[in-house]
Every structure is written in C-alpha cells, then in structure tokens.
Amino acid sequence: MKSVFISSTGASGYIGGDILSELIAKYPDHSYRVLVRSQESGQKIQKVYPGVSVIQGDLDNSELLTGESARADIIIHTADAADHLPAARAIAKGAIQGHSPDRPVYWLHTSGAGLLSFHDTENKIYGERSEIIYDDLRDIQEILSFPDHAFHKVVDKAVLKAGTVSPTTLRTAVIAPTTVYGKGRGPCYQRSRQVYEMSKFILENSQIPIIGKGQAIGSNIHIHSVTSLFMHFFEVALRGEGDGTIWGPEAYYLVEEGEHCWGEMAHSIGEIALERGFLKIQPKEIALEMDSAQELAGFEATSWAYNMRCRASRARSLLGWQPRGPSLEDELPGIVHEEFERLKGK
Ligand SMILES: NC(=O)c1ccc[n+]([C@@H]2O[C@H](COP(=O)([O-])OP(=O)(O)OC[C@H]3O[C@@H](n4cnc5c(N)ncnc54)[C@H](OP(=O)(O)O)[C@@H]3O)[C@@H](O)[C@H]2O)c1
C-alpha cells in the first residue's frame, strides 16, 4: 500500500466527517492530516481515529493551507469550501508550488448546486416550479457560464482555473452536491441542513412553511452517495490517473439521486410529525415571503423557495458512480424523529 498524505478540511463537519470515516475504514494505512479549527473537535477526531494528525488552524490562515497543500498528495476540501475564496487561492498556491508533473496532486473540492438556482435568485422568483433540469454533461457550457455573482461561482471558477495552469501537476474536480440528507458517520457533526431545518421549524412552530406557491423543486442526494463519489475520485487519484476528461476545465460534477418539491415535503413532514405524536395539533400552512422565511428559519430557508434541478450524468458516465442511498422520502420519518429527539434534548 502506497503511503499517501491526504490533507482534509472540514473533518469535524457533516460531509468532511463522513468522507473521513469512509476513507479510514477502506484505506487505514494512508497518512491523514486534517485541518480543524477547534481544539475540542480535534480531540474528538483523535479519540476516534488516533492515527490521524490533527492540524489546528482555520481557513483564514493562508500560510498554513498553502503549506499543507504543498505536502499533500490528495487534498479533500470541504470546510466552507463552496464559498471561501482565500482558502481556495491558498490551496491552489501550495498545490502548484509543492508539486511537479513527476509528483502531481489531486484536489477534490466541495461546492454546491445552489448555483443552479440562478434563474430564480436573479429574477426574485420564489416557489414557482421550473422545468429546467441541468445535465452536467449535456449542459456543461451553460453551467460554467453562470455569472460570478451566482452562488459559489467565484470559488468554482478559481478551482477549475487552477487545474488548467499546469494540468499535469495539479488536477482538480469540483463536486457540487444538491440537498444532502441522511445521518453522517463523522466523528463530530452528523446533521445536514435544509430538510433538517425545515423539520425543526415545523416541530417548533406547528406550521407548514410555504414560500410563494411552494412548488419549487430541488434535487437531493444521500450523504453516503456523496461520500461514494469522493471515494471514486480518491481511487482514481490513488491510481494516478490524469485523464483530461475526468479532471480539467470541465470537471464540474453535480451530485444527485432524486428530486423533491419543497412545499410537498413541508406537508409530508407535518403529517409525519402529527402521526407519530410529535405534534399535538394539525400544523397549519403559513405563507412566507423570502425575507420573513429567513428571519424565522435562518439562511437555510432560502433553498425552500428555489429550483435546483439537475442530472449528475458526468459522474455516472465518466466514473461509473452509482448512487445507492435510500431515498429522501424513505428517510424522512427518521429525519423528523431525529429532529424531535434533538429538540427535546435541548
Ligand atoms: N450539507 C449540504 O446539504 C450541502 C449541500 C451542498 C453543498 N454543501 C457544501 O459543502 C461544504 C460542507 O458542508 P457541510 O454540510 O459539511 O457543513 P458543516 O457540517 O457545517 O461543516 C463545515 C465544516 O467546515 C469547518 N469550517 C467552517 N468554516 C471554517 C473556517 N473558517 N475555518 C476552518 N474550518 C471551518 C467546520 O468546522 P467547525 O466544526 O469548527 O465548525 C466544519 O468542519 C460547504 O461548503 C457547503 O456549502 C453542503
């Protein structure tokens, strides 16, 4: 077994933690270095994985990120990766400085499919259904040509560009999950965002939040399937494959395995909560504007209003990835239950 240095950020988080747990389960002999900003998270990680080296620091410490990227063979960046431009720049700098065509480095960068809601965000359309479904093979040029103010775009662009500077030295792929659900397996944080926040809102307020007509549709993906895609990339990197179709300027990978309508999901959550006795009275629908939704339920509520529909053809076709997670529909009762228990314990 080759000894590989893997630098990973966000190991205390939901996606990064799940990836780390799977990497260590499958490849226990590699050397893992994880960047963690709190001492407490670092201790938790080392308790579960004593062989992992914990590096204390945060994304604003560019020098540290550059140094770690220079020594790594594979970089897995998840910590606020979709939106932190200085961190992406620091990683790019170290990756190029520390490597050569004889010793290339692979950068698996986590973004988000929020980019695809551009038409809605730009035109302030909330809760209307769109029939546009972006396919990351067929529509890649359209996806890559969203303007810089679209969600995550500036960072996505910087990462893909870094991969074109010296493609035999630095190979990049941008991995953009849709709404992620399912319990994470990481050592610290195991809860996702949008669906969980919606469940929390309904349980706390006994109200079904509907923004606009409530008809916007999102694509979704189970956390194990997100991790399985990272594992595919990881294995390609371990084999040292530099195929220009897998990496390079078009290496933008959407990650989905299903779709849901946000308004219908809010109603399903309400029904589950009532049936299981988590709510005592029938929750009532509440019509929300975007501003009031954010005020009441925080930033995650914005996604309840936007369309984000896509097909992850690139990973299926180029990497043979097959997502096999349980569907969001099947997981929903468990999610509502978990949120109920979590809120009870607060
Ligand atoms: N979850 C989803 O549904 C979803 C979908 C699409 C895209 N994404 C994207 O995927 C990435 C990871 O998301 P997630 O759900 O795993 O988030 P998360 O559970 O909140 O984890 C975020 C991780 O980033 C770390 N972090 C944040 N800011 C940092 C900083 N300034 N310095 C060092 N570490 C920092 C956190 O460290 P602490 O433990 O110290 O807080 C944590 O380890 C994000 O960019 C997100 O936008 C998520």
Image: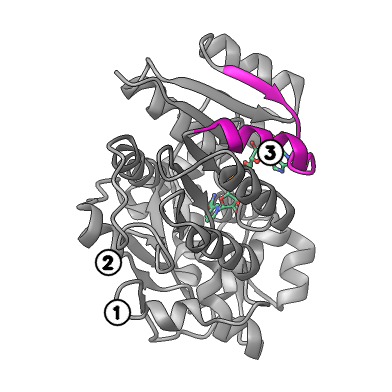
Q: Is residue 83 left or right of residue 224?
A: right
Q: Does the magenta run of residues contain 316?
A: no
Instruction: Check disc 2 and report the residue beneath it.
Output: 313
Chain part drawn in magenta: 53-72
Residue 98, x across and y down, in percent: 58, 38
Kind of residue sitting beneath label 3: Leu
Instruction: Check disc 1 and report the residue beneath it.
Output: 138
Residue 286, x across and y down, in percent: 65, 71
Q: Is residue 83 above or below residue 183?
A: below
Instruction: State which mark lies toward you, 3 or 1.
Output: 3
Q: Is residue 247 left or right of residue 291?
A: left
Instruction: Check disc 3 and report the residue beneath it.
Output: 65
Residue 254, x across and y down, in percent: 40, 63
Is disc 1 surrounded by few (<14), some (14 to 19) or many (20+) residues within 10 Å? Answer: few
Sequence-earlier tag: 2 or 1: 1
Quadrant of res 34: top right
Kind of residue sitting beneath label 2: Ser
Marks 2,1: beta carbons within 8 A: yes
Q: Residue at x 67, y 14 (%)?
A: 43
Q: Is residue 91 above or below residue 216?
A: above
**Element type at marker 1?**
loop
Q: Quadrant of the C terminus?
A: top right
